Amino acid sequence: MIRGGDINKGTVLLIKNAPYLVVEREFVNPGKGTAFARCKLKNLKDGSVLTQQVFKTPDMLEDATVDTITAQYQYMDQDNYIFMDTTSFETINVPLTLNENLKYYLKEGEEYPIVIWDENPIDVKIPQKMVFTVAQSENYVKGDTVSGATKPIITETGLTVRVPLFINQDERIRVNTETNEYLERVND
């Protein structure tokens, strides 16, 4: 159990038998009445978001125990993303239904943190910035459009990103995985 006043960003609470991650927290101490925490929560099972949840400081809430393990992505079959635990070498099956867009960010052989709750994987943590190789790109000629123009490209994982016209096939780019926006060209 955890007090409402002890809730912080990153705390996992158990609400209606589902784990919720505290994404944002604002502590409010009004002139009159009891202090409280106003929180935004994300359901770790289905990704839904609860906004403006209020927990008074003395309220007791049930905190969920979640574990994070590092696992290497192997491949995707019809129903699951297949990972291998890097410490025990056991296979971990993460259902596709958990996040179907995850396939655009997973690269074979790369390691990712997997969140486990109640002995089941409920989330795969993707880095905020990732480097991708441009697999498909149309060629544009300088002067085709005004400055700041972009074109769509497809990465080696199938992710579509809008990039500046000077980006060519086989180049490496850094992408913000939260917004799918191009950040910069990567020169190794």
Image (cartoon, grey):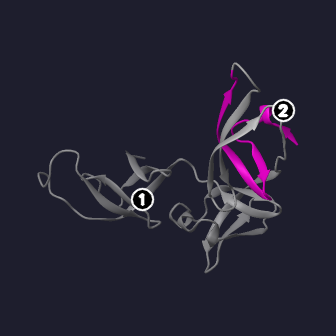
Answer whether residue 169 is visible to the viewer in this image. no
Q: Position of residue 80 (x, y in %)?
A: 65, 74
Answer whether residue 162 is visible to the viewer in this image. yes
| Number of numbered callouts drawn | 2
Q: Amino acid at mark 1?
A: Thr
Q: Quadrant of the N terminus?
A: top right
Residues in magenta, as a range: 1-30
Do labels 1 and 2 touch, CB within 8 Å?
no
Which of 76/16 is in front?
16
Q: What residue is shown at x 62% (from left), y 58% (from top)?
A: 47
Q: Position of residue 152 (x, y in %)?
A: 31, 60
In the rendered view, does 124 fall on the left or right side of 68? left
Q: Which mark is residue 11?
A: none
In this view, which residue lies farthest toward the right?
A: 1
Q: Is residue 173 above or below residue 3?
A: below
Q: Position of residue 146 (x, y in %)?
A: 15, 48
In the rendered view, does 160 fall on the left or right side of 87? left
Q: Is residue 136 above or below residue 25?
A: below
Q: Amino acid at mark 2?
A: Pro
For label 2, the residue is 58
Which of 2/98 is in front?
2
Q: Quadrant of residue 180?
A: bottom left
Please check the rendered image and state whether residue 144 is part of the magenta-colored stretch, yes or no: no
Q: Is residue 72 above or below residue 62?
A: below
- Badge 1 marks a residue whose secondary structure is strand
Q: What residue is shown at x 40% (from left), y 51% (from top)?
A: 173
Q: Which mark is residue 133?
A: 1
In the rendered view, does 76 fall on the left or right side of 185? right
Q: Quadrant of residue 35?
A: top right
